[in-house]
Image: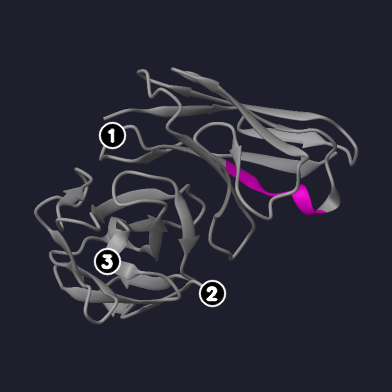
């Protein structure tokens, strides 16, 4: 059974940093692209970043480019999102999502989400 | 970036109704489109991928069609469990994008 478990959310001040993690199990982690998707209260999902399953290529939405960094450790089946220079508008539920292939794909499995609050 | 526009934003329907939701892409995305269902407090759930392929375990009353820039999600006979918000998502490019959502409400 595929499982994705996010952790690392919490309250952070504007300008601060936070590191999210996603522990994956139940599938061959290294074979699939993985993404981070967030959802602000009352809004639709927003794709943030992806990392390919094969060569580790990374991709970012303009809204987080230069502030967020995605990485993966295939030996530990772990996905990470380092978030720096956080803003009030970054407050959301953050999901890790497994893609259906090694490259751009639909998201066939999602974690339960971790809440990030940005406030002074 | 490719923009995805859904219509309508809200849809009121009754159990047993046939429901159709439309998603338009700002440029051609071939059939690289997915549909998701989301209920409050839950992560989105994949229903349809590659525009018309039904995800395993999803009831056959859900179907998808379209290619290029115009796509539809159809629920052939709305069930009580189907009242939720639906999103389309393109994956033609490495910058994946979602539509703004369609909320299906009880009439």
Query: Residue at label 2?
Result: A1
The answer for how far apart the CA atoms under marks 1 and 2 are is 29 Å
Asked whether, in this view, residue B90 is left or right of residue A14, the answer is right
Task: Examine the rendering and report whether any part of residue B85 can be seen.
Answer: yes
Q: Earlier in the sequence, mark 3 or mark 2?
A: 2
Q: Describe residue B91's horizontal placement relative to residue A74 as left or right.
A: right
Q: CA distance from mark 3 to mark 2?
A: 16 Å
Is residue B100 visible in the rendered structure shown here?
no
Q: Secondary structure at mark 2?
A: loop
Instruction: Tell me, for residue A30, which label it has, or none.
Output: 3
Q: Marks 3 and 1, Cα distance to the nearest angstrom?
A: 21 Å
Asked if B72 appears above or below A29 in the picture, the reply is: above
Decide: marks 3, 1 in contact (CB < 8 A)?
Answer: no
Local crowd at mark 1 within 10 Å, few (<14), some, or many (≥20)?
Answer: some
Residue B65, x across and y down, in percent? 60, 25
Labelled pair 1, 2 in contact (Cβ < 8 Å): no
Which residue, given by chain and number where applicable, does mark 1 sit on? Answer: B93
Question: Magenta part of the protein: which range?
Answer: B81-86
Q: Report x, y in % for residue A59.
A: 19, 48
């Amino acid at each position: 059974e595929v499982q994705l478990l996010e952790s690392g959310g919490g309250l952070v001040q504007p300008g601060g940093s936070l590191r999210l993690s996603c522990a994956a199990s139940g599938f061959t982690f290294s074979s699939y692209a993985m993404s981070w998707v967030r959802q602000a209260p009352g809004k639709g999902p927003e794709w943030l970043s992806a990392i390919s399953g094969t060569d580790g290529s990374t991709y970012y939405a303009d809204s987080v480019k230069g502030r967020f960094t995605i990485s993966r450790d295939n030996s530990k089946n772990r996905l990470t999102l380092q978030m720096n220079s956080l803003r009030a508008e970054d407050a959301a539920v953050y999901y890790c999502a497994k893609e259906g292939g090694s490259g751009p794909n639909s998201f066939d499995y999602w974690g339960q989400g971790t809440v990030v609050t940005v406030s002074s | 970036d490719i923009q995805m526009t859904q219509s309508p934003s809200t849809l009121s329907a009754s159990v047993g109704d046939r429901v159709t939701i439309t998603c338009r892409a700002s440029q051609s995305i071939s059939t690289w489109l997915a549909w998701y269902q989301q209920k409050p407090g839950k992560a989105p759930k994949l229903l349809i991928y590659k525009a018309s392929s039904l995800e395993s375990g999803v009831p056959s009353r859900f179907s998808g069609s379209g290619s290029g820039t115009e796509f539809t999600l159809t629920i052939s006979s709305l069930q009580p469990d189907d009242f939720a918000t639906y999103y389309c998502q393109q994956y033609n490019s490495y910058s994946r994008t979602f539509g703004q959502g369609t909320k299906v409400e009880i009439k």
